[in-house]
Amino acid sequence: MNGRSAFIVVTMALTIVTVARSGHEISVYPSYYPHEIELQTITQERATDLLLGGKIQAYVGRAPRFAGATPASIGSIESLGSFVIVRVNPSSSLARDGRSACAVAEIVVRDFAGKGGDMILHPYPVTPFHGDYLHHVDLAEAAKARILGGRADSSTAVVRDLKVKVDSELARALVNPDWHTRSSEWDVEVAEVGAAELVTSASFAMNGWLGPAWIRTGWFHAYLLLSERAGDEKVRRRIETHLQRLRTAAYDGAVERINLERSLVTALAGGCHTLVAGYTVKREYFNADSSTGIENIAYDSLEGFNSPIFIRTVKLKDFPWNGLLALGIGAPPAAAWNPVAGFTDEFGRLMWSAVGDSALIPSPYESAWMLNRISDVQSSAKQ
């Protein structure tokens, strides 16, 4: 590997036919899969020039900066970026019980309202980017109305002494400067959890299978985000019971399953020691120029370009099919390179999307799965 940390994947498609007729192409193209894919680790600043010059077709990672308006030759896509989490310190004198913990957490979240910026206020763990959001939309709206409708005088006892720890630039921009603290004694922490990283942390790939089956659901993401500090022992037992029933399909039909999912998220979000305040949107750019760019863009609502559906569908404009695809990515390789315990960083996930051949891949705009392979099955006469 040279200094630019590039990795080239070469694939060859072998088509077996029983009859060959001169001058005729195969009538079905399973995909526009490029026969060569180059992954380059490049900086965000350099990505702008390479995109504009057609040297790379897309950049996987933080959005590059353009001087002025985005050029017409550059397109963009949006996916779920990160969750913004508010954690209440159980040792804080301002949060001695569940009620006071909720008061403190809701004060912080309520203060985010009207700030603008990159975070979308959404105090519910299932977002519009999740395929099962329609099963939760009424609960999400009720949670937002409850927090924003909280009484202002309930905050007067703690606002003056509140100490908030932040872990990112976004969190620093959101939190009232008077509350910032670097002390080991803090009342609330505001943190970001990347959506793609959350999915990766609980997923696996084995024998052509990506899993678990529920890895893309909003209810499971709520469990990953909130279960560690959700309620008392009775509530935690109820959560684990609901989770086990969903994992083992111990329900009678879709209605009971959806009600289980709603009950699980309600139990998880009922406490306030950890609260989802909102989410951010990730924007990624691609070259859409008529000669050097790409088309037929498909992407994942949770992982954006770093997903199998993008690699499986992307088509270069100057080729009828196949072609040489050059992609830039912001993070250099850092994880082990093996399909069981590795490929967990951004570079590894993108590479595995290119060289892996899973039987099922995530459906890009829902929590379900879709077939990655087709089969030409010939019927035979009955004997």
Image (cartoon, rainbow, N blue to C red):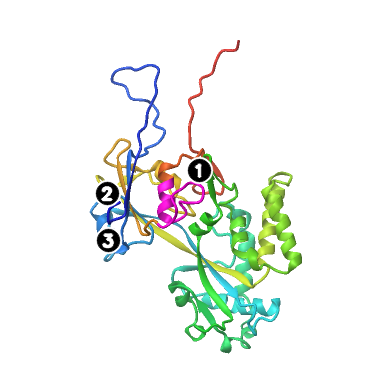
In the displayed structure, would residue 74 be above or below residue 140?
above
| Circle 1: element type | strand
In the displayed structure, would residue 31 be above or below residue 165?
above
Q: Position of residue 308 (x, y in %)?
A: 45, 45
For label 2, count other residues whose C-alpha is less than 10 Å away and answer few (under 14), some (14-19) or many (20+). Answer: many
Q: Judge left or right: residue 163 versus residue 172.
A: right
Q: Name the residue nearer the viewer: 299 or 140.
A: 299
The magenta segment is 334-352
Q: Judge left or right: residue 186 versus residue 291.
A: right
Helix, strand or loop for the magenta stretch, by majority: loop
The residue type indicated by label 2 comes to Asp
What mark, if any, has residue 289 been given in the picture?
2
Q: Quadrant of residue 315?
A: top left
Can the viewer see residue 305?
A: no
Q: CA distance from mark 3 to mark 2?
A: 19 Å
Q: Name the residue nearer the viewer: 225 or 27.
A: 225
> Which is more foreground, mark 2 or mark 1?
1
The residue type indicated by label 3 comes to Arg
Q: Residue 349 in magenta?
A: yes
Q: Position of residue 68 (x, y in %)?
A: 27, 66
Disc 1 target residue: 361
